[in-house]
Image: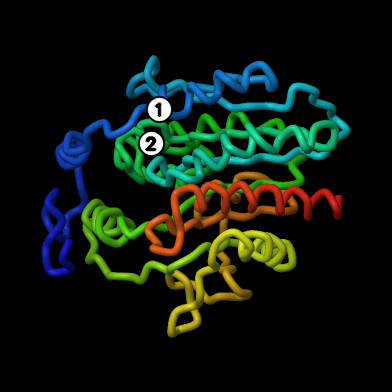
């Protein structure tokens, strides 16, 4: 979309109402199947892990049940680890990275951690390859009390008993070219604001918590991922997506005030991964591997210091 062109839904300068939200939702067709891509994999894991339904989307409860995967031998004395994917449903490697980790690596940590994995928090957005939920709400700005996003509220309820007990939370995301071509222009249109173009970084990076930074932890994860894919460099201003780079491949956000998923608990170690799937230097498989590598490196670091 050209910067000079207005977003095709709404009136420039005016926030969306119900009519515009309905028009936006109607413009998005099903492009892949949550049942085939996600639920089928979860079903295969039932023989080795406990699978729990923790909610469903009222938009279509039968089509969009929400599932998590838990360690089968849960022991209260063990440290607890939370892995989340698909908060933004279009960020594909986050969903499949979470599932791949459970399939191939979770058993390596049996008896050492209690593991809770929510691999696809936003299944409608997964099917339509969208950032928002069906009501044009960003779940990743909605992890707060009285959340307006049912995807976020359901996860908050699930995690509530563990909120103060978690050692680690890794939230798996992507930054894509469509962030600039579609999702940020849509955000500006929805809110009645002017779209300000940004720059998409080429490579993997992490988002730390500016209110409780763990720079050495973030650097250890970056070092592990650098062995499987390239790390995003800072731009000419020393930034990545508008935030100062505080270590190679690491920026910081105020996670909890922004309502971000990675800020929903009091875990000592928290990070948001950001894979760049549109890079000519990274394949789909590399993107999934980067997510899995980040999870394993994060757990190894946290356990070594628990």
- Left or right: residue 66 compared with residue 295: left
**Rendered location of residue 241, percent (x, y):** 43, 69
Q: Residues within 10 Å of mark 1 (few under 14, many from 20)?
A: many
Q: Is residue 222 above or below residue 7?
A: below
Residue 280 image-quadrant placement: bottom left
Sequence order check: which comes first, mark 2 or mark 1?
Answer: 1
**Tag 2 near tag 1, CB within 8 Å:** yes
Who is closer to the viewer here, 1 or 285?
285
Element carrying mark 1: helix
> Residue 29's image quarter?
top left
Residue tagged by mark 1? 34
Residue at the spot of label 2: 126
Residue pictured at 61% horizontal, 65% vertical: 226
Residue at the extreme bottom of the image, as rendered: 236
Quadrant placement of the N terminus: bottom left
- Is residue 74 positioned above or below 147 on the image? above
Q: For the residue labelled by badge 2, is the local secondary structure a helix, a strand or a loop?
A: helix
């Amino acid at each position: 979309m050209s910067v000079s062109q207005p977003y095709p839904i709404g009136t420039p300068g005016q926030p969306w109402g119900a009519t515009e939200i309905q028009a936006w939702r109607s413009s998005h067709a099903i492009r892949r199947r949550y049942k085939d891509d996600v639920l089928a994999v979860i079903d295969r894991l039932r023989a080795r892990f406990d699978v729990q339904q923790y909610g469903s989307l009222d938009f279509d409860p039968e089509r969009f049940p929400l599932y998590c995967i838990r360690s089968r031998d849960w022991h209260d004395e063990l440290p607890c680890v939370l892995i989340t994917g698909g908060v933004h449903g279009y960020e594909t490697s986050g969903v499949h990275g979470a599932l791949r980790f459970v399939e191939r690596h979770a058993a390596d940590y049996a008896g050492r951690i209690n593991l809770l994995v929510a691999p696809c928090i936003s299944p409608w957005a997964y099917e339509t390859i969208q950032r928002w939920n069906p009501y044009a709400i960003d779940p990743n700005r909605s992890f707060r009390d009285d959340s307006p996003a049912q995807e976020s509220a359901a996860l908050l309820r699930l995690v509530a008993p563990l909120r103060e007990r978690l050692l680690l939370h890794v939230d798996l995301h992507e930054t894509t070219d469509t962030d600039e071509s579609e999702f940020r222009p849509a955000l500006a249109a929805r809110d009645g604001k002017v779209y300000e173009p940004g720059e998409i970084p080429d490579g993997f990076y992490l988002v730390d918590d500016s209110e409780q930074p763990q720079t050495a932890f973030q650097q250890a994860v970056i070092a592990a991922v650098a062995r499987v894919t390239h790390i995003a460099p800072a731009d000419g201003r020393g930034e990545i997506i508008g935030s100062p780079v505080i270590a190679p491949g690491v920026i910081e956000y105020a996670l909890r005030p922004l309502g971000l998923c990675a800020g929903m608990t009091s875990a000592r170690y928290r990070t948001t991964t950001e894979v760049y799937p549109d890079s000519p230097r990274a394949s789909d498989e590399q993107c999934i591997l980067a997510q899995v590598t980040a999870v394993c490196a994060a757990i190894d670091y946290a356990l070594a210091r628990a």
